Image: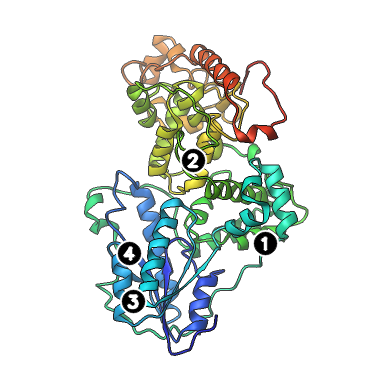
Amino acid sequence: MVMAQATSAVHWFRKGLRLHDNPALLDALRSAQHVWPVYCWDARLVTPQAVGVNRVQFLLQCLDDLDRRLRERQSRLTVLRGDALEVLPRFMRERQVSLLTFEGDVEPEGRARDERMLRKCHQMGVQVHSFATHLLYDPDRVIRELGADELPLSYGPFVARVTEALGAPALPLAAPPETQSFGTPDTDPQAYAVPRLEELEAYRGMTATTPLKGGETTALAVLGAFLSERRDEARQFSKPHTSPTAFEPASTTQLSPHMALGCLSARLFYYRVQELHPLRRPPVSLIGQLWWREFFTTVAYATPGFHSMKENRLCRQIPWSADAEEQYRAWEGGRTGHPFIDACMVQLRKHGWLHHLARHAVACFLSRGDLWVSWERGRDTFDRLLVDRDYALNNANWMWLSCSAFFHQYFRVYSPIKFPQRFDKEGTFVRHFLPVLRNMPAKYVYEPWKAPLSVQREAGCVVGRDYPYPIVDHEVVSKENLAKMSEVFSRERRPMEKFAKKRPRPECVE
C-alpha cells in the first residue's frame, strides 16, 4: 500500500541490524517523508543472568556500526530506553508517526511482543508493515505451502519440498544510497545514544573478552574476505571436516553471530556463495549451513513449546537426573577433569563461541554421553554465554545431541579423550585454554590422571591439586547411559522417526 508522502514513519530495528537487504526500511523510506530509525534498549532484559557480557558488547558494536552507517546518510539510530511497548508508542505519538515498519520476529517472545505492538498501533491509527527477512523464506509461507501437518521433520525432505514449492529465494536488495534522505532532524545525542558497556550498571566491573567484533561493516568484510582470500576453501567447504581445535583463526567463517543478529542477510550470503563454482553440495557445504538454519528455525516456528521437553511434541521424554547439580556446575565451570571438555567450556566463557563439533562434544558429555543432565540445563548455559545465541538453533542442536529429537543414533557417543586427538594430537587447544596443562606431555594431555606422579610434578600440574580428577569414568558411564537410552527408545517414538533410515547398531564411540 502506497502512503501519502506527508506521513512520518519509524523503522524499528530489533534483529535485522543492517541496511542492506532490508525491505522494511526501504518500505518506510518509500512511504514517508520523515523516517526515524529506532532501537529500543530494555535494561530489564539485558542482565548477566540472561545475557553474557561478550554478547552485550557484540550487540553494542552492532548498534554503533548501524548508527555510523545511518549517519553517513545524514540520519542516526535513535535508541529509546525502556519497554518497547511503552516507549515506542509514546515516541510515535509525539512525532505524529503514521507508519511503523520492522522485520518480523521468528522467536515466540518476539512474536508475542509484536502482536501486542500491533494492537497498540491499531488503537493509535498507526499502520504496521512487517517483512519476513530473517530467513531465506517467509516461514508462514513455507508452512502454508507445505501444510502445517505435513511440514517435513528431517533436513533432506524439508529442503526438497521447500525448493520445489517456492523456488529460489528472493534476490537481496541493496542498501539505501548515501544520498538517501531520511528527512528527520538529529535528536538529542545524549538522550538517544547507543549505550556504552561501562555505563550498564548490571555489568559494572565486567570485561568482554570475545575476539569477535559486531556490526554490518565487519560482517560484509568477513564474508568478502572468506569468499575471495579463501576461495577454494569456501568452494569446497565441508563442515564435518573443519577442526574444533583450531583457533586464531578458527576453521569456519565465524559469521554465525552476524547471522543471529541480522547484521548479514541470509539472502545475500546465499547468492554470494552461489557465485562460486563448482560448489560442494548440501548438507555439509556453506549453502547447506543456511539450509540447516532454515530447517530448524521453520520447525521451531511451527512448534509450540519448542524450548521445553515437556511442552514440545517432537521431544523425547527422557528421565534425566534430578540431582546432578554438582556435576552440572563442574561442566559449566570447566572443572570436569576431562581436559578437552574443560578447554571447550573455557573457550565458550572467554570467546562466546565454540566450533560446532566442540559444541557437539560438550553437549553429548553433559547429557546422554556422561553426566545424564537434561539438555535444557546446557541449553540455558549456551543461551547465556554464546555471542551467536539463536533460539531455534540452540534448542534444536541440544535436542539433537541429547537424542531428544531430530537424531536417533544414541549409540554414537563423543569420547572426550579419543575424539579431540583426531584433530590435535599435541593438545595445542587444551594447552592454550587450560594453561595449567601447558607442560603436560602429549601422551597424557587428554588423560593427565594417567601420568606418573613424577611426570605430573615435572609438568607443574598434579591432578587433584592443580587440576581436578575426572568427575566420571567415561568408559563406564557411557555404557551405562547407552543402556538407559536403549530403554527410552524401546518404549517411545517421536514424529520425525518415520523419516529415519538407519537403525541402531553396536556402540560406536567417536
Question: Residue 413 shows which numbered tag?
Answer: none
Mark 4 residue element: helix
Q: CA distance from mark 4 to mark 1?
A: 33 Å
Q: Earlier in the sequence, mark 2 or mark 1?
A: 1
Residue 395, disc: 2
Q: Which residue is mark 4?
A: 85
Kindly indicate the quadrant of the structure image that contains residue 173: bottom right
Residue underneath mark 1: 169
Tell me: residue 314, above or below residue 263.
above
Mark sitting earlier along the chain (1/3): 3
Among the two numbered marks 3 and 4 on one chain, the one whose residue lies closer to the N terminus: 4
Labels 3 and 2: the sequence-earlier one = 3
**Which mark sits nearer the N-terminus, 4 or 1?**
4
**In this view, 456 is above or below 94:** above
**Amino acid at pointer 1:** Pro
Instruction: Answer few, some or many: residues within 10 Å of disc 2's Cα (few below 14, many 20 plus, some between 14 and 19).
Output: many
Q: Amino acid at mark 4?
A: Leu
Q: Is residue 182 above or below residue 110?
A: below
Q: Which residue is mark 3?
A: 92
Looking at the image, which residue is at 55% across and 71% down?
23
Between marks 1 and 3 in the image, the one whose residue lies nearer the viewer = 3
Q: How far, Cα to Cα, is label 3 from label 4?
A: 11 Å
